[in-house]
Image (cartoon, helix red, strand yellow):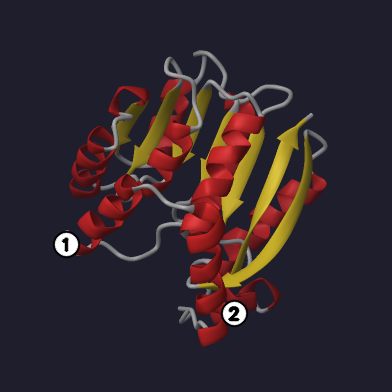
Amino acid sequence: MIEHVTEPGWVDVERYLTDVVVHPDPVHNRALTSAVEAGMPAIEVAPNAGKLLRMLVQMSGARRVLEIGTLAGFSSIWMAQGLPDDGRIVTCEYLQKHADVARANVDAAGVGHKVDIRVGAALDTLPTLAGQESFDFVFIDADKENDSNYLDWAIRLGRPGTVIVVDNVIWDGAILEPGRDEVNAPGIVAALEKMGQDPRLDATAIQTVGSKGWDGFAIARVR
């Protein structure tokens, strides 16, 4: 398994950008605090990434969002804030205890009416969404070994123009040495290769540094 290492300068710059540019709402900080109090892993997106998700939802004109990996609802809140009042997020969370924390957080943030939390394995939930209205925006941030499977479902449940964001695609550089993390890295590599080769997608990937270590995200548009 990879130990995600950070550098003091990375964290300081991220904190500066968060304070000067991002300006998180108290509801975002409350969600982070509740996750800590519940003993949940600190693997939510950083505030600057959360705001990026909100802006991407807004810029894409999304009305329906699919999120795979809810945790405490931190990214759900950011994205829900970017939706119109009648917009909707369907978010998949494996653990009921995490879903309970997320429900309390999205309700406290005033966006609970936009958020539909589905509990259980995402690969069991996603087929139940087939045949419904397509999703305009998809955020994948769950178990990395299934990233490629989630990506395939994102395409199937989307439409031409759907935006797909996949988090944690650098994994401290383990994508170049998958043997460093045989559980997660191969799944990330498979998803990146699919994004680069699947004719249904136009994609890019960006590496980042900050409080979450050396990582990054990939973003694609369904053709």
Label tally: 2
Which numbered mark, 1 or 2, is in the foreground of this view? Answer: 1
Nearest the viewer among 30 and 65 is: 30
Mark 2 lies on a secondary structure that is helix
- The Cα–Cα distance between marks 1 and 2, rounded to whole angstroms, is 34 Å
Residue tagged 2: 179
Residue type beneath disc 1: Glu
Q: Is residue 133 visible?
A: yes
Residue in front for this viewpoint, 134 or 85? 85
Percent position (x, y) of residue 67? 46, 38
Q: In which quarter of the image is the C terminus?
A: top right
Horizontal side, residue 12 vs residue 33: left or right = right
- Would residue 138 be found to the left or right of residue 26 on screen? right
Q: Mark number for residue 28?
A: none
Q: Which residue is drawn at 43% across and 28% down?
A: 89
Q: Which mark is first along the chain, 2 or 1?
A: 1
Residue 17: image quadrant is bottom right
Q: Which residue lies furthest to the front in this view?
A: 20
Q: In this view, does 27 lie to the left or right of 43?
A: left
Identify which amino acid the numbered label 2 is placed on.
Gly
**Residue occupying image coordinates x 60% and y 72%:** 209
Q: Pointer 2: residues within 10 angstroms few (<14), some, or many (20+)?
A: few
Q: Where is residue 40 in the image (x, y as percent from the top left)?
A: 25, 61
- What residue is disc 1 on? 37
Residue 58 position, x and y percent, is 59, 31
